[in-house]
Image: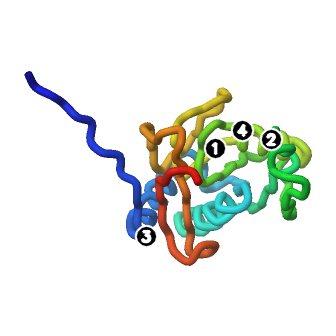
Amino acid sequence: MLLRFAPAMRNSYEPADVQRIIEQLVARIAVGFDARKTLNIVGIRTRGEVLAQRLAAALAKQGFAQIGRGVLDITLYRDDLSEIGPRPLVRPTRIDIDIDAQPLLLVDDVLFTGRSIRAALDALSDFGRPSAIRLAVLVDRGGRELPIQPDFVALTLSDVPKDHRVNVHFAETDGADQILVEPKQ
C-alpha cells in the first residue's frame, strides 16, 4: 500500500521571498493595465497602503507615468465594528485624486473572508465611480465568506487552517519584510 502525504505548508517567507513575490505581482499588474493611461492605486490601511506604495513605485519604473495614489481607512465601514471595541482607531482616508471614470487598483495585503474588501468597496463609493476596480493582494489564503475574488495575486496559500493567521510584515511598518503563518492568539 502506497501512502501519499501532502507536503507540509510553508509557514515563513523571508525578505528575499517577499521581494520576489512582490516583483511577480508587479509583472502581473503591468500586463493588466495600459501604461499610457491613468491608473489610480488605492491601498487599504495599513499594510495594503505600504504594498500600494511599493507597487506604484515599481510600476512607475516600468513606464506607468500617470499613477494616482490614495489611502483608504475602512474602519467605519466594517460589518464587525461593534466587535472591535468602544473606541476603534480611525485614521484618515486620503483620496485626493479624481477616481471617476478611471481604472482603480485596490490593494490589500491578505485576502481571507472578503469582508474587508466589501467594506473598501463601500468606502470607495463615497469618493466616486471608477471605470473599473481591480483587486490586487499579496496573499490569498482562501476561506471566502463573500463572493469576492482578487484579479492579481502574488501568493496563494490554500491550506491555512482556520485557527491560523497570515501576518504580513513590511520594513516600513514592522522593521523587516516577512510573511508568517501562525496560530491565532
Tell me whether circle 3 and circle 1 mark residues in contact (CB < 8 Å).
no
Residue 115 numbered mark, or none: 4
Tell me whether circle 4 and circle 3 mark residues in contact (CB < 8 Å).
no
| Lower sequence index among marks 2 and 1 | 2
* Mark 2 lies on residue: 80
Q: Label 3 sits on what residue type?
A: Pro
In terms of image quadrants, where is residue 47?
bottom right
Q: Secondary structure at mark 2?
A: loop
Residue 15 numbered mark, or none: 3
Residue 63 numbered mark, or none: none
Q: Point out the image quarter for the N terminus.
A: top left
- Marks 2 and 4 sit apart, C-alpha to C-alpha, by 9 Å
* Mark 1 lies on residue: 135
Q: Secondary structure at mark 1?
A: strand
In terms of image quadrants, where is residue 159?
top left
| Lower sequence index among marks 3 and 2 | 3
Q: Residues within 10 Å of mark 2 (few under 14, many from 20)?
A: few
Tell me whether circle 2 and circle 4 mark residues in contact (CB < 8 Å).
yes
